[in-house]
Amino acid sequence: MTTHLTQTKPPVLSVVLPVFSVVLPVFNERESLAELHRRLSSVMIALAEPYEIIYVDDGSRDGSGDLLAAIQQNDAQVRVLHLSRNFGHQAAISAGLDHASGDAVIVLDADLQDPPEVLPALLAQWRLGFDVVYAVRRERKENLFKRSAYDIFYRLLRQVANVEIPLDAGDFCVLDRRVADVLRKMPERNRFMRGIRSWIGFRQIGVPYNRAARFAGQPKYSLLKLLRLAFDGFFSFSYLPLRLASLFGLLVSFLGFLLSVWTVYKRFTLPEFPSGFATIVVGVMFLGGIQLIALGVIGEYVGRIFDEVKQRPLYIIGERRGFDDERQAPDA
Ligand code: UDP
Ligand code: MG
């Protein structure tokens, strides 16, 4: 009976599904890639489990794409997604998540600011049963302006966000399969990954690490892109800006009401009522300013609603390398 059972078992699958998938968004990181791949591979090999490394070439224009293709040629664990243009860091991460098949998905930057050597410590927490293990920066090697900007941003976001977003946690993290699946199904376009990651819940833990300096080159986040990301964080996770607009409106209307009562009273009690030109100008300017700010705030939300309604894909893949078709995840 037993022998019969063993004989009818389906043949063992020839492909070994990876336990770990590492997702790296790459935008013009030519100088770092060789060193990155060397360090990351040696960490992954030491873990002694099947793994895959997914480089997402986010429309690089410095030859990073060709370099990644060459790395993929020489390493069977490597897969490369070439996006059709630069879609941005958060979209590149989404592309990687959609194509990762590991039990744990690791997201890390390609500029070696997130040292691959920290991974075993993160994975140890995942093995203990945590679904999301995010790395928390103990220190940053960046200039004072950027450091203070980040400081203010994270602390402000924590005050206004309607989810608890941990301080100083970036995109560097380990996600359990089920979390990766949940994240993939989240339909929103304006992705502030660390916000969504906190929003979904599950068992989460932070592991402190020292954020290194960039291995080479300039940051690929321009000030404008950073500002956009910060805005996504605020407007996607908080209604406070809208409420502030209403609160301000209420306050100003109340003051306006008091002023009207006073004006009418003076109109009838003073024999020569002064023509308050300055008052009118100040009033108009002040109210105009507040109205424009409120409109801008509403615009931020309307723009985001428009993005969602259009339902455009988050990214478009130009080419992929190293994926077997059977295991290929569908495009998002
Ligand atoms: N990146 C990307 N697309 C972009 C900008 C950045 O894929 O449009 C990648 C970049 O190659 C790096 C990571 O995102 O691997 C983080 O970017 P960066 O180092 O510029 O950000 P910072 O560390 O300054 O926050
Ligand atoms: Mg960086």
Image: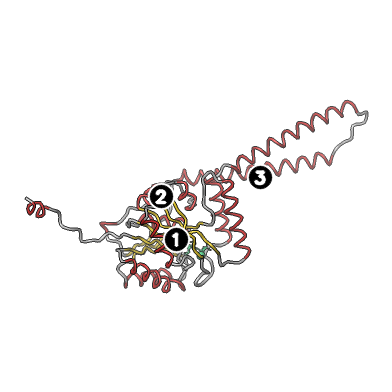
Which numbered disc covers residue 85? 1
Q: Is residue 331 above or below residue 257?
A: below
Which circle, 1 or 2, is nearer the viewer?
Answer: 2
Amino acid type at mark 2: Leu
The numbered mark, 1 or 2, whose residue comes first in the sequence reads: 1
The numbered mark, 1 or 3, whose residue comes first in the sequence reads: 1
Q: Secondary structure at mark 3?
A: helix
Q: x, y (%) of residue 61?
A: 46, 68
Q: Secondary structure at mark 1?
A: loop
Q: Secondary structure at mark 2?
A: helix
Q: Nearer the viewer, residue 73 or 178?
A: 178
Q: CA distance from mark 1 to mark 2?
A: 23 Å
> Which color scheme is applied?
secondary structure
Q: Is residue 146 left or right of residue 122?
A: right
- Is there CB contact under 8 Å for labels 1 and 2? no
Is ligand 1 within 8 Å of the beta carbon of the residue shown at mark 1?
no
Which numbered disc covers residue 100? none
The numbered mark, 3 or 2, whose residue comes first in the sequence reads: 2
Q: Which residue is mark 3?
A: 293
Q: x, y (%) of residue 74?
A: 32, 73
Q: Is residue 286 above or below residue 20?
A: above
Q: Is residue 260 left or right of residue 138?
A: right
- Is there CB contact under 8 Å for labels 1 and 3? no
Q: Which residue appears at 47% of the width and 49% of the height?
A: 198
Which circle, 3 or 2, is nearer the viewer?
Answer: 2
- Is there CB contact under 8 Å for labels 3 and 2? no
Q: Is residue 17 left or right of residue 250?
A: left
Q: CA distance from mark 1 to mark 3?
A: 34 Å
Q: Which residue is mark 2?
A: 183
Q: Residues within 10 Å of mark 2 (few under 14, many from 20)?
A: some
Amino acid type at mark 1: Arg
Q: Residues within 10 Å of mark 1 (few under 14, many from 20)?
A: some
